[in-house]
Amino acid sequence: MKPITPVPGRADQAYQALLDEICDGVLAPGTHLVQEELAARLGVSRQPIQQAMALLRSDGLVEEIGTRGLRVTALDPATMRQHYEIRAALDGLAVRGAALRAAGSAEVARDIDRRGRALVQAGKAAAGGTSLRRMVRCDVDFHRFLYEASGNPLLAQTAEPHWRYLRRVMADVLRHAQPGTAIWKQHAEILAAVVAGNAVRAQALAAGHVDGAADRLAGALQRATAA
């Protein structure tokens, strides 16, 4: 008997489609979201759209505008910083745990190196292209790999709500603040420290990576506001 492959429901598909458009900038900050129009464009009824909107609202990606419905939330520098602070702590724990595991087992170190290098190569290839969605997906995949490599399954579970918000933020980092090639150079350095079993260096590099991304995006938002 073959295992049943779960098929995403219409609400999940609508959520993913709208999330992609928000992250890609197709639905820009401030865009008024009319449920009837979205339902017609995606070829679904209003109910899946309503469910998708509830999820996006809980993610902080859309907000109510009085009696007029919903709109795409503008990036708020303070909220963005708060998410990045939590991400820095979780990423630091992840790379520390992964480095300690690598230090304790040559086999584990080789596995982390092999899988991590493949993700870095995929990320560099994506950075050389034009698909922002692919760049973000590769970035998220790399960090999820670090959570897995830590050996602590609670890290990924704890980080997931923040990543739904940060995926949109990361798209803006790549769009406005930093070339993808520089990001993957930093990823490669973090991976090398983990594989070497150097937990202190891995944590420092991870913290610098996250803090630097937050600083660059905050600068980009300030410049956009001033303009």
Image (spheres, helix red, strand yellow):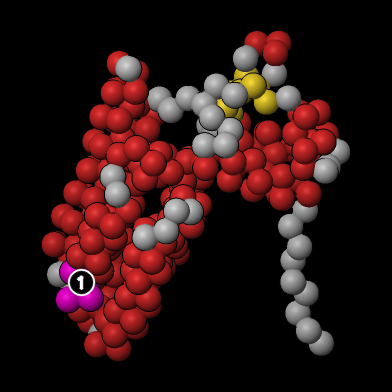
Residue appearing at x 29%, y 70% in the figure:
98
Magenta region: 192-196
**Residue 223: in sight, yes or no?**
yes
Q: Quadrant of residue 221?
A: top left
- Which of 194 and 150 lies nearest the eye of the viewer? 194
Residue 27 in the figure: left or right of residue 109: right
Front residue of 138/156: it is 138
Three-letter residue code for mark 1: Ala
Crowding near the residue tagged with mark 1, few <14, some 14–19, many ≥20 C-alpha atoms within 10 Å: some
Which residue, given by chain and number where applicable, does mark 1 sit on? 192
* Residue 89 shows in the view: no
Quadrant of the snapshot with the N terminus = bottom right
Position of residue 143 measured from the top left corner of the image (x, y, whole percent): 38, 60
Task: Give the x, y percent position of residue 38.
Answer: 75, 34
Q: Is residue 93 above or below residue 50?
A: below
Where residue 111 sits: x, y (%)? Answer: 34, 83
Give the total number of marks visible in the rendering. 1
Does residue 142 sit above or below 44 in this rendering? below
Q: Residue at x 23, y 42 (%)?
A: 211
Q: Position of residue 175 (x, y in %)?
A: 39, 41
Is residue 199 found inside the magenta-colored segment of the image? no
Residue at point 77%, 42% (across, down): 42
Tell me the element at label 1. Answer: helix
Could you tell whether 168 is left or right of 51 in the image?
left
